[in-house]
Amino acid sequence: MELCGSDHSDRVSHHSEKTKKALISRLNRIEGQVRGVKGLVEKDTYCDDVITQISAIQSALNSFSKVLLEAHLKSCVTERIQDGDLEVVDELLVTIQRLMKK
């Protein structure tokens, strides 16, 4: 099992298969929602209805981000701190700031 390292070129996540499957399942649903919006635009669906679907996609992406961030905190961040790599805290703060801009 690879650990999240401080060298960006070889960093990998190491989520459990259960977590990975849950994340992929969420992404598959989001992908379907995006394809659905494309279809609505192609069919000249009323703009407000399209915007409602876009809002649902944004909500789904936010939910996905929360689940991924939780998994990241419980695995990568925790392990890097235990290994004495405190640089991960600054990295995490930047990540949280990025998420909060949205």
Image (cartoon, rainbow, N blue to C red):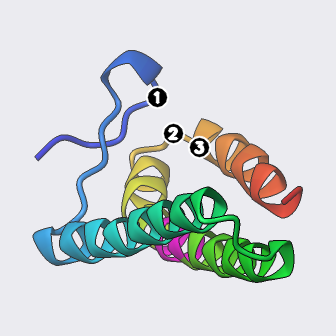
Q: Which residue is mark 3?
A: 88
Q: Nearer the viewer, mark 1 or mark 2?
A: 1
Q: Which residue is mark 2?
A: 85
Q: Is residue 50 above or below residue 81?
A: below
Residue 6 disc label: 1
* Magenta residue check for 65: yes
Q: Is residue 88 above or below residue 57?
A: above
Q: Position of residue 22 (x, y in %)?
A: 27, 77
| Secondary structure of the residue carrying numbered label 3 | helix
Q: Are marks 3 and 2 in contact (CB under 8 Å)?
A: yes
Distance between the alpha carbons at the discs numbered 3 and 2: 6 Å
Can the viewer see residue 74?
A: no
User: Split into 4 quadrants, where in the image is the C terminus?
Assistant: bottom right
Amino acid tagged 2: Asp
Q: In this rendered view, identify the residue nearer to me: 6 or 95.
A: 95
Q: Are marks 1 and 2 in contact (CB under 8 Å)?
A: yes
Seen at 57% across and 78% down, the residue is 60
Q: Quadrant of residue 2?
A: top left
Amino acid tagged 3: Val
| Secondary structure of the residue carrying numbered label 2 | loop
Residue range corresponding to the magenta coloring? 64-70
Q: Quadrant of residue 49?
A: bottom right
Distance between the alpha carbons at the discs numbered 1 and 3: 8 Å
